[in-house]
Image (cartoon, coloured by chain):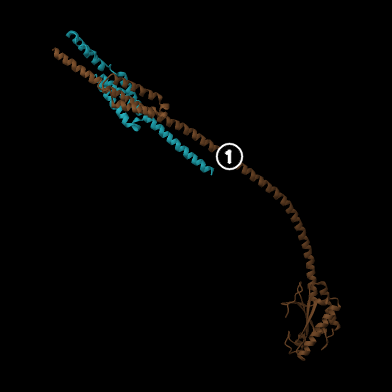
Chain colours: A cyan, B brown
């Protein structure tokens, strides 16, 4: 942005500035290191969500996480590291959501069962008491 | 070349500007903010999922900064997506923890219910024990009462035995009495008839057409008087009967007089006149045919009808 305002200097300087600006721009937007760490984290999160029972309780979320993990790996191969990073991060958060949804649903079930047990027990006692 | 360069520079600048600065607004980010604010204003989520909410907040701050710095829509969208997913995770975490709390509560509740059940059982057992004790007390009382009753029963039985013995003794004396009565009645030649005991005294008591007792008749009447003295509850009806010789009215009068003679004799022998009634029937009730002398003798008779022990006599 500054380069744009100072282009009234010598052509050499202008050229240098232009190249610098272009490099800065590319570096600012694309200078992402290969996101091996985030991809590994995402893979672990997907696996954790799967073993928690995500396929049963959060099929949409787990599917999304797996698709994004694959896409991240593909982007890695294409050396599109920025997209690989974003996809890995989104895959991880989707997997975390799937796991949270699964655990919540399970806890809900347990609570429901206990409530029912309690109700039955109380009914039984009341009957015995009569 | 220069112009070209300028043009290139300009295009690049435009590209930079459009890429980073053209978006002062991002729909996904606005949604993410709204989601976050809603979650943050829900006390259970704020209390139960503070970590997850904080992560969402961090993502939002990053997204806001990216938007402010004019980073690509894709970048802002990515960060907004991360924030929204983290808000959703915060929701679910809160839900999960609420359920866990419910489980804990349910367990406590169940324990409470079980405790109540045990208490109820214990109370029931106590009650049962109390009932058993009460019942056994009642039974003990019953047994004591029964023992006491048994003693009094024994006493009653002893008394009854004694009474029975007395009765047996009485019975023996009654038997003796009955034997005596029978003997006396036999001597009087008493007959058991529908009207009760009847003694028939033959015409040997009187002379022909006479109403005065002969001496032999007096002894028969004496036996009768003895019997009546021994059985003061009995009364007698004395009936006079004749055969069919002579006029009916004469026979009627004769039978009455004869019956009265017997009555007079009994009263003289000490029998209360109240106990003796008389009736003369003449020839009305023969016991034989009147064709032969022997039959006519059977018809001439005095019948003495004894009352029962209550003094009742069955009339003809």
Residue B295 in which image quadrant? bottom right
Q: Which residue is mark 1?
A: B123
Residue B82 in which image quadrant? top left
- Residue B29: x %, y % from top left: 31, 25
Q: Which residue, as the protein is rendered here, is positioned at the far bottom? A: B246
Q: Is residue B209 toward the left or the right of residue B31 in the image? A: right
Quadrant where the C terminus of chain B lies? bottom right
Residue A88 in which image quadrant? top left
Counting every numbered tag in the picture gives: 1
Q: Is residue A50 visible?
A: no
Q: Is residue A18 toward the left or the right of residue B270 in the image? A: left
Q: Is residue B266 toward the left or the right of residue B141 in the image? A: right
- Residue A33: x %, y % from top left: 28, 16
Closest to the observer: B100 or B245? B100
Q: Residues within 10 Å of mark 1 (few under 14, many from 20)?
A: few
Q: Is residue B42 visible?
A: yes
Closest to the observer: B183 or B218? B218
Q: Secondary structure at mark 1?
A: helix
Quadrant where the N terminus of chain B lies? top left
Closest to the observer: A64 or B14? B14
Q: Is residue B239 depicted above or below B31 in this figure?
A: below
- Residue B265: x %, y % from top left: 85, 80
């Amino acid at each position: 942005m500054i380069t744009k305002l100072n282009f009234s200097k010598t052509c050499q300087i202008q050229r240098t500035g232009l190249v610098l600006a272009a490099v800065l721009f590319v570096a600012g937007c694309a200078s992402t290191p290969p996101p091996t760490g985030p991809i590994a984290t995402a893979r672990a999160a997907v696996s954790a969500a799967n073993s928690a029972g995500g396929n049963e309780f959060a099929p949409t979320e787990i599917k999304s996480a797996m698709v994004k993990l694959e896409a991240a790996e593909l982007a890695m191969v294409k050396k599109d590291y920025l997209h690989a990073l974003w996809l890995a991060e989104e895959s991880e958060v989707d997997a975390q959501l799937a796991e949270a949804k699964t655990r919540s649903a399970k806890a809900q079930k347990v609570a429901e069962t206990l409530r029912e047990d309690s109700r039955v027990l109380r009914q039984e006692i009341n009957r015995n008491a009569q | 070349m220069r112009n070209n360069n300028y043009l290139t520079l300009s295009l690049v600048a435009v590209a930079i500007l459009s890429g980073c600065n053209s978006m002062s607004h991002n729909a996904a980010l606005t949604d993410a903010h709204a989601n976050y604010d809603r979650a943050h204003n829900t006390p259970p989520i704020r209390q139960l999922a503070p970590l997850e909410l904080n992560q969402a907040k961090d993502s939002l701050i990053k997204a806001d900064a990216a938007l402010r710095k004019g980073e690509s829509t894709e970048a802002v969208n990515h960060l907004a997506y991360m924030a929204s997913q983290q808000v959703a995770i915060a929701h679910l975490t809160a839900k999960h923890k609420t359920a866990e709390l419910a489980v804990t509560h349910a367990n406590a509740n169940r324990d409470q219910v079980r405790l109540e059940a045990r208490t109820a059982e214990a109370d029931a057992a106590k009650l049962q024990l109390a009932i058993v004790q009460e019942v056994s007390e009642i039974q003990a009382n019953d047994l004591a009462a029964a023992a006491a009753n048994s003693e009094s029963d024994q006493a009653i039985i002893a008394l009854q035995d004694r009474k029975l013995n007395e009765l047996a003794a009485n019975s023996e004396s009654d038997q003796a009495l009955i034997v005596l009565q029978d003997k006396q009645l036999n001597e009087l030649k008493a007959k058991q008839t529908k009207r009760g005991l009847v003694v028939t005294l033959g015409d040997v008591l009187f002379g022909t057409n006479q109403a005065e007792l002969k001496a032999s008749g007096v002894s028969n009447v004496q036996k009768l008087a003895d019997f009546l003295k021994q059985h003061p509850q009995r009364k007698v009806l004395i009936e006079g009967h004749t055969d069919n010789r002579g006029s009916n009215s004469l026979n009627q009068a004769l039978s009455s007089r004869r019956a009265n003679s017997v009555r007079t004799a009994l009263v003289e022998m000490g029998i209360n006149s109240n106990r003796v009634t008389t009736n003369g029937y003449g020839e009305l009730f023969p016991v034989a045919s009147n064709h032969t002398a022997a039959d006519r003798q059977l018809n001439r008779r005095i019948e003495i009808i004894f009352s029962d022990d209550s003094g009742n006599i069955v009339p003809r």
